[in-house]
């Protein structure tokens, strides 16, 4: 499969390139950056030094001319770009028979009217939006392989939904009761192009975008119930943890809760059921999600915590899982047993 990665100078794009280099069914044809990128012409390994001697390939600038010259040789394209770029270009690739994996939020919400509210722009690619399929890897829809456009889930939604799905699909939640999701992300969640708010000396653990974060409608949509989502930014580079609190139906026992989670994940190699609360250091630089739940049967309160690496399970390695599903390969193909090594790029601890 010949693929291009657009956004290869960014944090997610770099992780994705690293994973695709390890994937023996994939050949990377183009590493692409924005039209006016300061990285245009630089070697991938000059920007992301851990790939020195492994991927010394020049980055190319995206343009209409680049698109016309490259599109017919591609089987798939990965967008690790701003949402607006994905919205503008996905349909054009689809029309040339190129499978699109979009790691931005451009195609995750099914309701176009939510885009102005949560993303700040009106969606202009409604045909593509209508056919996009949500790629939460362990919960793919039966017809997943039909779509030419995969909306790879957001980082907070990935951790939140892995916690919520076993509960919601087994209808264990008390109808209309409050669901609260507290998420904490490291600073690489904000991307490579720094701002004062995400500079090292400025970041202290604090909530942000309360009641208006774009992942609130995404989590609610895929959980099938409205959630309150409280994101927090924390002073570490990588990793994300979501703790979900719900009230369950009066008849739900601890055994029923255990069964729901075990049934969902016992055969999923990239979701690890823990015997104690997960922690970010155990999943950073890995494609795993670590999950743990505690249920107080007397109060019917369930608390579920999931930890992931925001750039991997929250983005790049989940995109590879989606690619594997499309190719009919096991979800963990090329991922399990070949973990990325913490080294020298800016996002690495
Ligand atoms: N960081 C995270 O934890 C996660 C991020 N995501 C999503 O993945 C995407 C990338 O995020 P991240 O890697 O953090 O962001 P970065 O800012 O680190 O990287 C963005 C990349 O997109 C490129 N780019 C910017 N504008 C354009 C354009 N107009 N045309 C083509 N390429 C463009 C940039 O190129 P250059 O700067 O060289 O011009 C860069 O390579 C975003 O949509 C983000 O929401 C998803 C899940 C988790
Ligand atoms: C810490 C931080 O800023 N995180 C980002 C979320 C990560 C991201 O890029 O969002 P997607 O998963 O939707 O692509 C934010 O809150 O906007």
Image (tube, rainbow, N blue to C red):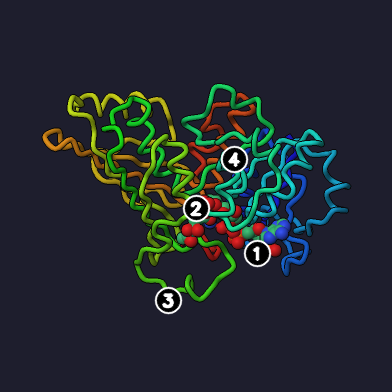
Label 2, residues with CA under 10 Å away: few <14, some 14-19, many ≥20: some
* Residue bearing mark 1: 47
Disc 4 target residue: 151
Q: Residue at x 42, y 54 (%)?
A: 239
Q: What SS does tag 2 mark?
A: loop
**Left or right of 32: which side holds 251?**
left
Q: CA distance from mark 1 to mark 3?
A: 24 Å
Which of the two discs, 3 and 4, sits closer to the camera? 4
Q: Which residue is mark 2?
A: 214
Q: Which mark is residue 325?
A: none
Residue found at x 71% / y 35%: 99
Between the residue at mark 1 and the residue at mark 2, the CA separation in whole angstroms equals 29 Å
Give the secondary structure at mark 4: strand
Choose the circle earlier in sequence order: 2 or 3.
3
Crowd rating for badge 3 (residues with CA inside 10 Å; few <14, some 14–19, many 20+): few
The percent coordinates of residue 64 (x first, y second) are: 85, 53
């Amino acid at each position: 499969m010949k693929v291009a990665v657009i956004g290869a100078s960014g944090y997610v794009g770099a992780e994705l390139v690293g994973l695709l280099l390890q994937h023996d069914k994939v050949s990377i044809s183009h590493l692409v950056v924005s039209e006016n990128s300061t990285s245009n012409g630089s070697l991938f390994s000059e920007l992301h030094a851990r790939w020195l001697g492994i991927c010394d390939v020049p980055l190319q600038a995206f343009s209409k001319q680049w698109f016309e010259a490259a599109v017919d040789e591609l089987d798939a394209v990965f967008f690790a770009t701003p949402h607006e770029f994905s919205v503008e270009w996905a349909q054009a690739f689809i029309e040339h028979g190129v499978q699109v994996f979009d790691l931005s939020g451009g195609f995750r919400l099914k309701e176009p009217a939510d885009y102005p509210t949560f993303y700040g722009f009106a969606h202009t690619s409604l045909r593509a939006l209508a056919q996009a399929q949500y790629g939460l890897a362990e919960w793919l829809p039966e017809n997943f392989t039909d779509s030419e456009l995969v909306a790879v889930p957001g980082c907070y939604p990935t951790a939140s939904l892995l916690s919520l799905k076993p509960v919601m699909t087994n209808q264990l939640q008390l109808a209309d009761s409050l669901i609260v999701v507290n998420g904490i992300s490291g600073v690489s969640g904000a991307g490579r192009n720094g701002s004062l708010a995400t500079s090292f000396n400025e970041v202290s653990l604090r909530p942000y975008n309360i009641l208006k974060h774009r992942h609130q409608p995404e989590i609610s949509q895929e959980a099938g119930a409205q959630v309150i989502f409280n994101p927090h930014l924390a002073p570490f580079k990588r990793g994300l943890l979501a703790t979900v609190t719900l009230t369950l139906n009066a008849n739900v026992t601890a055994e029923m809760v255990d069964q729901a989670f075990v049934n969902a994940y016992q055969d999923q190699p990239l979701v690890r059921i823990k015997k104690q609360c997960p922690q970010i250091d155990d999943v950073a630089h890995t494609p795993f999600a670590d999950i743990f739940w505690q249920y107080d049967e007397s109060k019917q309160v369930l608390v579920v915590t999931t930890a992931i690496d925001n750039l991997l399970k929250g983005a790049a390695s989940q995109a590879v899982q989606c690619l594997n599903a499309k190719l009919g390969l096991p979800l963990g193909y090329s991922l399990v047993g070949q973990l990325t090594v913490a080294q020298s790029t800016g996002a690495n601890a």
